[in-house]
Amino acid sequence: MIQFQCDYTEGAHESILKRLTETNYEQTIGYGCDDYCEEARNTIRRVFGVPDAGVHFLVGGTQANATVIAAALKPYQGVICASTGHIFVHETGAIEATSHKVLAMPTSMGKITAAQVSHYCRAHYANSDREHEVQPGMVYISLPTELGTLYTKAELEALYQVCEEFHMYLFVDGARLGYGLMASDCDITPEFLAAHCDVFYAGGTKMGALFGEAVVITNKTLNQDFRYMIKRHGGMLAKGRLLGIQFQTLFEDGLYWKLGKHADQLAEQIRNTLQECGFSFLARSHTNQVFPILPDDLCEKLSRKYMYCYQERIDNSHSAIRFCTSWATRPENVDALCQDIRSLSAK
Amino acid sequence: MIQFQCDYTEGAHESILKRLTETNYEQTIGYGCDDYCEEARNTIRRVFGVPDAGVHFLVGGTQANATVIAAALKPYQGVICASTGHIFVHETGAIEATSHKVLAMPTSMGKITAAQVSHYCRAHYANSDREHEVQPGMVYISLPTELGTLYTKAELEALYQVCEEFHMYLFVDGARLGYGLMASDCDITPEFLAAHCDVFYAGGTKMGALFGEAVVITNKTLNQDFRYMIKRHGGMLAKGRLLGIQFQTLFEDGLYWKLGKHADQLAEQIRNTLQECGFSFLARSHTNQVFPILPDDLCEKLSRKYMYCYQERIDNSHSAIRFCTSWATRPENVDALCQDIRSLSAK
Amino acid sequence: MIQFQCDYTEGAHESILKRLTETNYEQTIGYGCDDYCEEARNTIRRVFGVPDAGVHFLVGGTQANATVIAAALKPYQGVICASTGHIFVHETGAIEATSHKVLAMPTSMGKITAAQVSHYCRAHYANSDREHEVQPGMVYISLPTELGTLYTKAELEALYQVCEEFHMYLFVDGARLGYGLMASDCDITPEFLAAHCDVFYAGGTKMGALFGEAVVITNKTLNQDFRYMIKRHGGMLAKGRLLGIQFQTLFEDGLYWKLGKHADQLAEQIRNTLQECGFSFLARSHTNQVFPILPDDLCEKLSRKYMYCYQERIDNSHSAIRFCTSWATRPENVDALCQDIRSLSAK
Amino acid sequence: MIQFQCDYTEGAHESILKRLTETNYEQTIGYGCDDYCEEARNTIRRVFGVPDAGVHFLVGGTQANATVIAAALKPYQGVICASTGHIFVHETGAIEATSHKVLAMPTSMGKITAAQVSHYCRAHYANSDREHEVQPGMVYISLPTELGTLYTKAELEALYQVCEEFHMYLFVDGARLGYGLMASDCDITPEFLAAHCDVFYAGGTKMGALFGEAVVITNKTLNQDFRYMIKRHGGMLAKGRLLGIQFQTLFEDGLYWKLGKHADQLAEQIRNTLQECGFSFLARSHTNQVFPILPDDLCEKLSRKYMYCYQERIDNSHSAIRFCTSWATRPENVDALCQDIRSLSAK
């Protein structure tokens, strides 16, 4: 069975394993205070052009989301996100566990707009009984989104401006950041991203690390005492250097971006094949996720050899599914998939 | 600088790194549902003699503590522990973050007794205004404790009985379980432990794994829906197999116990040397932590070459400190330390 | 200015004030353990036909909602409600403050259906990754709803059955219960209600008391230790007898139902007048809330003399507003309003 | 049975009931936005000399404590208090319910000192691993304390200074404020109190109101958006004017202080009688609580006619108990008690 159902089916890029093995018997102090972490923090600051940012290494995405959001919000505040947002649908209430409401907004293709957010906030503050409602305190977006789509520079800038106007933080979930920024249709650079939000993270788990998310906090107020928050949320890894070593490896020479581009190109090959065969898509993007709408019998046939993700039912005989490529995807497996799609849909 | 300040200064046992490397490019499904995890769960069930237990792999100790305790308690209940307990002093309120009070009890050498707990509960239920107080719902102990001490079979049995009497769960934090059960003065076996509590964990982080704690839940009610709890607390590792592979390696052929004994024996060597030199101890045990009371000038001299943990001030000229050995401690480093203790204290 | 904007603009029914004054200097023990509370609990058990139910007096609705829901749910569970539900929109995240997600469902006229709930639950349990989502643990409905509408016996019974099927509690918010059960089109009796849910409350605040909600818990498991929950949520009134005296007065001789009918009839008079004048309604019911859709200039004219509630914009020149009658509404004020509606809309 | 077990056994001062009755049928808007509340807020600002303070009326003490503390603390912070503090022992974890730890300190007679707090904070910030501990963010004291004792001006000033030094809020629980400030040995004035803390409350429940606590927030940052916090904690009374009317009555002409002095003088009469009879006291003060240490047989005899509070066992044959006077205590009942103490202890 060849797996395309997600981007965390393999272990880690070999250079990461190699580095972990080489340093295995060194003795370091714990909790991210070692030299490897410090080096990785500096590398990341350099790559994103934010020399003063706080950089913190957490183990997973749900943990990163909950820790950042809980650090940012006052008790009576909530976080705005798209109704498809990971924090709204796929984290078992991890945000509510920190006692905050997720304020879900209707979304088109996984994105929300500055106009939507502005309208919502304006209505809240215009309400004389507003203290009976949750106050919006943060906007959470994903780059790329759950549907693989991307915000443009202009959209990100507009959202950031609305956040400033209504005294909200802007938080960008970059679990798949490398796949996003390397997409052929992405006009956002690492530096632009870091300059247009208060906090974001560059995901490692889905981008070639064994695990780990690098949280970058450019807003000084938010960064203050953030390590207390990490510990409180069970996110402070005892052997913190494991994270430092992995992120240093990913970012020191651009491996992160190279892996992103690898996956994007293979996804594009699948996308092109599907399009040539005449299929349409639930969402269009040039990142590592492909969401074709396929006849159910084709899905069934593909499922004998390939694992993919079921997305949603379209009509009586069609479903939207997801193929995901990753840093580890082998070109020969993509070739096989494309070949099978062609031959199965030709009949 | 030679490090004795804690038991998580190195990476992982080489057989773990080897196994991670060998399996690196295999594709598995996520979140602990893969075959490696299933295999490790069965191995652990076998080792502890609990074929029906739930076994869950979490990343760290604070996370394991908070997730288990939050799963066990009703909203108005708290967890009883020694005033030295890790959850009371060293976790930045991670238990309170789940909205539960930690009910700290006076302790002698890190332990609490069945009599203490019984007295507390009896007083609570005898109080006609008891609903103005937090109801005790769980007892948390560590094996070994923060001071390296051990509960006996009789003590554990008595605590478990009190817990049953007052409808409380008994939870054993085994972050250093291997060092505890392998101590020369420990009369508790793996099977006995598992049969005399509702939930415990066998720590990996301090026992030769890169990271990870294996939570074993023998109480069926507590185990129900526990995976929701893990996800909600940000503890469900995407590449769950990393934990399965590590715990399978540690437990399949007794490596876990071998590593525990290794550290205990080296600690005993340090302990014997200190005793021969006439020093007393803050706490006595035969596990991997040594707590001598030393003259401040000797501490100062040792600190030029060795890292240790400062524990507490004893008097104007003496301090209690902690030396910690581990699965990775090299005999030659212990020899050097012992030699230096002897020569420095001889003067 | 004559106020129709809500049903809590006056103090309390005069017989309540009288009784509070008469008993003022008696000495009683606190926290609801006095004889007045016991008497009121028994009266309420009798009226609703539930001799074994737990009856608890809380001060306000948000407090009652949060306390009941937090008592019912396991940490990873959420509560299903209509997207118009009070707990979803008007309580500043009081439910999320107890760390639970409110699972809002699309609604027609403030109600949700058994079919909706069943479909949602079925989908949840069919999902192999369900532990990544919040588990539904309770259904919350209002009787009458926020839009004054009512569930029928059949609808309530069906909801209760779905709840049992999926191991969920059914909770009925009866802040306006008297206005609901006394409505001319309501086929639910007090006994039927109590027999078809796990917990409900009969509101006092909007029904003639100074304040207070009588929470009735028919489910024994949910009732256990509920007083701890009340205290923990800051809802245990020191002078608890104030609540006992009020609810005894409301329920001993049917005053509660009489006051409900009074308001419903006056609301019907307003409704009929509006209908005669040719206006339509946002929602239709026979309870104490009236939701006409009116031309903006009529609204403006009415607002010079009457306070009402703005509900929502319908189109460029029309708005839906709410008139609320209550136990205290004077017939002459309703006459005046009807007269003005007639004359202003005649022009 | 004559009740001395607490200070909330009766209803309300007659002038409060009278005023509630007179205003009963007036129509006002809800949630504390009416004119009565505004008037009472201004009166309280005047009485305490804080023209710019936020004044908020809550229903009860536990609610006030939880709301204020949750508003003040960052997620990883805790609140320091005496180990006898109400929030630590008598509120069923209401503070922990907001996810904050109560940092209990050893106490002498219910008080904590500036030196204690300073030492604790200094140690916290000196610890290089401080992020593994809860950060102190607020100090909570009671005036008078649970044992009826009082802070002096100098002690309050010193505590406030330490709080400023370590960026903590100082919060004074004044559930019995009138009994405290009117005590013959109290050198703190209303103005001094308000000028030497960030937030305090003047309790109504124990001081002649039916219920209610007036929270006064002098710290502007803490006051911001506080109404959201009240609503979120279920503390926003729909008929808010009930609180405004009560507090206006208590404070407009000094009734609050008069009632405080009444109770203090009657308590002093009991205290003097006990002293004359040769009994000692668990704690000494001149407020409305008296804590004699009495032979068990005397306690038993008194209990046939009087209700008092059991405090703690002193030795085999003696117990400390509490007599509480209040705004409603009748002099003839105190005379009777004193007479009985004299005659029973003479034998």
Image (cartoon, coloured by chain):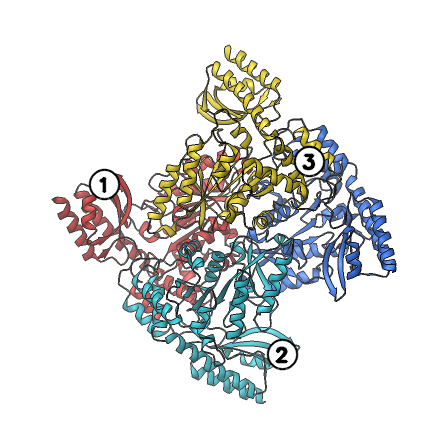
Chain colours: A cyan, B red, C blue, D yellow
Q: Chain of mark 2?
A: A
Q: Position of residue A179 (x, y in %)?
A: 46, 75
- The residue to which callout 1 is attached is B318
Q: Quick check: marks 2 and 3 in contact, CB under 8 Å?
A: no
Q: Is residue D3 left or right of residue C286?
A: left
> Crowding at label 2, few (<14), some or many (≥20) Cα neighbours within 10 Å?
some
Which of the 4 image quarters holds residue C216?
top right
- Which residue lies under the disc numbered 3? C244
Query: Which chain does tag 1 point to?
Result: B
Q: Nearer the viewer, residue D63 or D21?
A: D21
The correct choice, above or below, for B172 with respect to A49 in the image is above
Q: What x and y, as percent, mark residue C16? A: 74, 35
Q: Are marks 1 and 3 on the same chain?
A: no
Which label is found at residue A318? 2
**SS label for mark 2:** strand
Mark 1 nearby-residue class (10 Å; few <14, some 14–19, many ≥20) = some
D186 or D347, which lies in front? D186
Please determine whether, in this image, residue D113 is positioned above or below residue A297: above
Asked where in the image residue D335 lies, by quadrant, the reply is top right
**Cα distance, mark 2 to mark 1?**
77 Å
